[in-house]
Image (cartoon, helix red, strand yellow):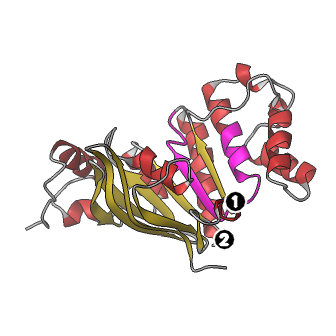
Amino acid sequence: MATLALQASHLCKRYGELSAVEDVSFQVRHGEILGLLGPNGAGKTTTINMVLGILQPSAGSVEIEGIDIARHRSRAMAHTNFAAVYATMPGNLTVHQNLRFFGLLYNVAGLNARIETLLAELDLAHLRNTRSGVLSSGEQTRLALAKALLNEPRLLLLDEPTASLDPSAADLIRGRIRAMAATGRCGILWTSHNMYEVQETCHRVLFVSRGRILLEGDPKALPQQHGAATLEELFIRLAREPLAQPGPAS
């Protein structure tokens, strides 16, 4: 197994004179949940899309499990998966049909057993024959996560994975993701605007604004280190003054 699930080096994405991401470098280790934080338009989704190979960087490189995605994207993506509230599943297929369809695409060994495990773990078994287009937003989110876990990825990208969930369902998802990271076989990149969730879930965070990394560290320790009472207070300060890095507390 490679030392790192993900190595992003000096990523840039420019659209003419607009710089969406500028010289962003970070790593995700196996067993780690890394939070990617920042206001809307900070460059988080652009960064994720470059990691997935959906967008080609203007400069920089991405390696997944030591594989350069610019040269061997199919090999790298075999170790990767993704879930987001805006990436909905085909609505005319049932929950089970969706999982079977994607499982066949991913060439998942023992697919039927894998589907049954995920249906049980994510409380979807009673919805197996329900078309995904009529599921609630929370149920669709759980289905998207089940799809993302089908191939037991070494790198999992989660863009606002609990945004549409009630507190109980969100807690279920966080617990499932923490357990997955605890196996040490997967690295997870997680974006969220819920600072409580970030503190409870992530081992390390990156604050980004205007396409640049402003701050990095332990989400439980960062507020005190930078003179803020909470992570949310620190987030608001960075979002409102995105070009000024806060100094340490006096």
Residue at the spot 89% in from the left edge and 52% down from the top edge: 111
Residue at the spot 60% in from the left edge and 57% down from the top edge: 156
Q: Look at label 2 and name its amino acid.
A: Arg
Residue farthest to the left, as pictured: 250
Q: Which residue is identified by label 1?
A: 74
**In-front residue for pair 32/9:** 9
Q: Look at label 1 and name its amino acid.
A: Ser
Q: Earlier in the sequence, mark 2 or mark 1?
A: 1
Q: Quadrant of the N terminus?
A: bottom right
* Snapshot quadrant of residue 138: top right
The percent coordinates of residue 165 (x first, y second) are 56, 34
The answer to whether 62 appears left or right of 97 in the picture is: left
Q: Which residue is identified by label 2?
A: 185
Magenta highlight range: 143-163
Q: Is 99 rendered above or below residue 71?
A: above
How many numbered callouts?
Answer: 2
